[in-house]
Image (tube, coloured by chain):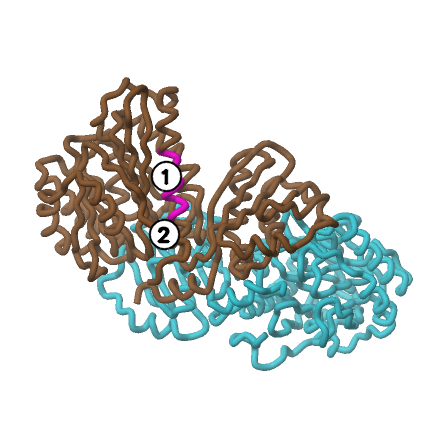
Chain colours: A brown, B cyan
Amino acid sequence: MQKSPLAPTSPADLLAVPGLRLATGHSGIKYKNRDDLMLMCFDHPVAVGAVMTRSRTASAPVDWCRQVIHQGGMATAILCNAGNANAFTGAAGHDAVRRCADAVAGAMGTDPQTIMLASTGVIGEVLPDDKIIPHLAPMVAAANPDVSNWHAAADAIRTTDTFAKAASRKTRIGDTDITITGIAKGSGMIAPDMATMLGFLATDADLPPKVLQDVLVRVNEESFNAITVDGDTSTSDTVILAATGAAEHIAITSADDAHLSDFVHALREVMTELAILIVKDGEGASKLITVQVHGAENDAAARRIAFAIGNSPLVKTAIAGEDANWGRIVMAVGKSGEMVDRDQLDISIGGILITSNGMRRPDYDETEVTAHMKGDQITIQVNINIGSGQATIWTCDLTQQYIIINADYRS
Amino acid sequence: MQKSPLAPTSPADLLAVPGLRLATGHSGIKYKNRDDLMLMCFDHPVAVGAVMTRSRTASAPVDWCRQVIHQGGMATAILCNAGNANAFTGAAGHDAVRRCADAVAGAMGTDPQTIMLASTGVIGEVLPDDKIIPHLAPMVAAANPDVSNWHAAADAIRTTDTFAKAASRKTRIGDTDITITGIAKGSGMIAPDMATMLGFLATDADLPPKVLQDVLVRVNEESFNAITVDGDTSTSDTVILAATGAAEHIAITSADDAHLSDFVHALREVMTELAILIVKDGEGASKLITVQVHGAENDAAARRIAFAIGNSPLVKTAIAGEDANWGRIVMAVGKSGEMVDRDQLDISIGGILITSNGMRRPDYDETEVTAHMKGDQITIQVNINIGSGQATIWTCDLTQQYIIINADYRS
């Protein structure tokens, strides 16, 4: 697969996170010439938060992780494999998950109920865990804190991704320096409610599971849940945030603690950067599209209008064709079903206001917008002009390459 | 534009409807070498029912038609133009509509408030009614009841349609023979709530506006509102059913009258036939897909699950690639958000049961399904196995041709 034209030109500058070790491995289940296993081991049981797919046909590892979180949110390892989603695999799928957790816990001397698991890839094939398990004890032994392992991990979790996705930030809690590093994968079946995407984030902050969970849910809404490639939602989406507690700082007992605001800001930066990288690797993407809606009835309405635009095949194909077809944006706003006064709608592309009073502005000159359409970063702004609700989402254009990739993914 | 591979091989066998006259004309607004105007004149004011887009950014003619229906639903003519939707055109668009209605009514000697109008095509350009109005009086004069005009009308209302869509049925009300004939257009921006589609249906039955409206809404739900090409909803959708009253039959005062059941059945046949023709002309379509869901919590849930499948780009591209990728159907059912028990789900393609007990059946042999995928009529059946709700919808595959058509429609 050719690398996305929107891929970063140089690898991310990553920071190691004290309190964890990483290893990668090669099961060969689907990918023959690269690692496809990632293991993150913690020096002791650490707090984790997790957000998972809302799909009603969630995968076996998603069910398993929900249980770990439900039991208190303490983990000793995260195992991920690429190439097989272990979704819609019935009791056999659950057995495969349990055996993998047993194997990691056995090698680490910990409780299987503290092993988080994530799988992505083909749906409906039972995970051949016999190809994974022999690698797990060696991976536990090999895991080490070197920052180069984060790059290897970002590579190993890819499926149809054409580049690895990783980001780091330094921040502070009180007077203490804190690191946040994360990796993610995903390029198709990407939609709000998280689609086939995985994200693994770690920090050396010392935060209780409840605080981690609250922060993660909140930041997730504005990052991973604010992107769409094709409106499809996967059975496997999982974002995990682990706090190793290796840093010593003032005690935090609530997600609303003012001392946490720098941390939340940095986490939002990491997660938004990863989310946008996923859109930039959207199957067939040639342009990144930012949709900003404001003046809606409320934030939820703004979000639904933004997604009506971002998921519209007609808007996305027009952008692929570099056509400033703002009429399709009008159509998409209309189909959202949200409160809209057609005659109050302001639509801008690339910062150029196109409409007023329910029609094209008399002085509208397409030249500048057409020039903007030829770039690879397209901005659509819509002011509904009836309230104060706002939302920003990211998507990509819909190209012939999307069809080519998805018409024969399995074969 | 090349004709859809799913186009009928011979023109429909149409029946004239007593009580109306048809004419077509050429405005040249967008299409240079074919008629783009359609006028249906009634011998006297007749009852009409109408269903229109739920878009919040509806076009000027949609606003106008709503008013005609609101004022009692009596019409003397229906005018349609292709190539310009007169949508998002503000006050200037409304003025253009009014001038067209005035011109038709003036030529016929009737009230402008009894002229129904419909426009489709590019959004955001004010309708240049000066190119239409000179043709209207000659069209009123030329209109005649000959059945060949139905074929010409079906041709004139097309935009990106690659073939004309028309259907007729004979039926009975009491002892009286009744005719129903209809034409439709649409090939992209097709979704439930009717997308860019127009349908004009006429019958010589003698039914009051309220009865017509009730019958139309009900039948529309299972026909034009049960199709999707791309999930996009247009600003212009309009379906009009006119009853000329030329046939003399027992009086009908309610849509629930048992004497109306044959008529409703025939109307459903005409409208479903037209709806499926629209899907067969779906932009870039190479396969017609029928999605049948049963065993859902209720009919509405079944419908939402069916559309989650029918609108999924991943399901539609897999079918374009003739890939029996049933895992994507699992994904789509899961994302519907409806009540589903993953382990109870039965999925069949081409009548072959693939899943049981939350996984692929042990004896599943892909050979027969793969053969079915190579045909041009694909059937997906899903049994949710938790209730008695059911729904059938139609869609088409998503091909490279869809992108090619939509990436440069305006130019």
Is A3 or B160 nearer to us in this picture? A3
Considering every residue shown, the one lying at the far top of the view is A250
User: On screen, A118 above or below B129?
Assistant: above
| Residue B180 % position (x, y) | 69, 69
Residue range of the region highlighted in magenta in the rendering:
A267-277
Magenta residues, dominant SS class: helix
Residue picked out by circle 1: A271
Q: Is residue A279 left or right of residue B43?
A: left
Determine whether the residue tagged by mark 2 lies in a helix, strand or loop: loop
Q: Residues within 10 Å of mark 2 (few under 14, many from 20)?
A: few
- Give residue B13's quadrant in the image: bottom right
Q: Is A265 positioned to the left or the right of B35 in the image?
A: left
Could you tell me which secondary element the residue under label 1 belongs to?
Answer: helix
Viewer-closest of B56 and B140? B56
Residue at 60 percent across and 64 percent down: it is: B409
Tag shown at residue A9: 2
Kind of residue at badge 2 = Thr
**In this picture, is B203 found above or below A276?**
below
Q: Chain of mark 1?
A: A
Q: Residue at x 36, y 30 (%)?
A: A215
2 and 1 marks on the same chain: yes
Position above or below: A49 against B398: above
Q: Are marks 2 and 1 in contact (CB under 8 Å)?
A: no
